[in-house]
């Protein structure tokens, strides 16, 4: 189990616990449940990289304590 943070730069910092084998899409669904938004509207970024829904966290080398930038599309 790893803990990941998502910061939307509007004051919301969401902490989510998930497995390294979960996909980015699974992570978006969990975040969407916590903030009450549709998961299709969420975009996860880090710098200039946009994370794709079908790729696992392990493949992106996302580790415990990783911080995502959360955007609404």
Image: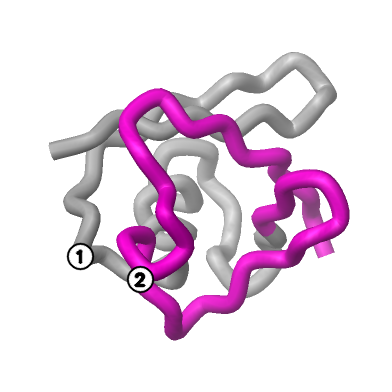
Is 51 drawn above or below residue 2 in the view shown?
below
Q: Residue at x 54, y 65 (%)?
A: 39
Q: Is 23 placed left or right of 54 in the picture?
A: left
Is 40 drawn above or below residue 10 in the view shown?
below
Q: Name, please, the residue furthest toward the top.
A: 11
Q: Are marks 2 and 1 in contact (CB under 8 Å)?
A: yes
Q: Which residue is mark 2?
A: 56
Q: Which residue is mark 1?
A: 21
Q: Residue at x 78, y 49 (%)?
A: 71
Q: Is 64 placed left or right of 51 in the picture?
A: left
Image coords of residue 17 (percent x, y) = 25, 36
At mark 2, the secondary structure is loop
Chosen colour scheme: one colour
Task: Tell me, yes or no, whether the highlighted magenta stretch contains residue 42.
Answer: no
Q: Residue at x 82, y 25 (%)?
A: 9
Image coords of residue 8 (percent x, y) = 74, 33
Looking at the figure, which quarter contains the C terminus?
A: bottom right
Image coords of residue 5 (percent x, y) = 49, 29
Tell me how far mark 2 sits from mark 1, CA to CA. 6 Å
Q: Main secondary structure of the magenta part?
A: loop
Looking at the figure, which quarter contains the N terminus?
A: top left
| Residue 20 found in image quarter | bottom left
- The answer to which of marks 2 and 1 sits earlier in the sequence is 1
Determine crowd level at label 2: few under 14, some 14-19, many 20+ residues with C-alpha closer than 10 A.
Answer: many
State which region is magenta.
44-73
In terms of depth relative to the viewer, which is nearer, 29 or 56?
56
Numbered circles on residues, count? 2
Q: Residue at x 23, y 35 (%)?
A: 2
Q: Name, please, the residue furthest toward the left.
A: 1
């Amino acid at each position: 189990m790893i803990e990941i943070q998502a910061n939307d730069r509007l004051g919301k910092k969401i902490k989510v616990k998930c497995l390294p084998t979960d996909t980015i899409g699974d992570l978006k669904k969990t975040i969407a449940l916590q903030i009450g938004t549709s998961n299709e509207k969420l975009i996860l970024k880090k710098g200039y990289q946009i994370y794709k829904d079908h790729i696992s966290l392990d493949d992106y080398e996302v580790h415990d304590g990783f911080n995502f930038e959360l955007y609404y599309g």
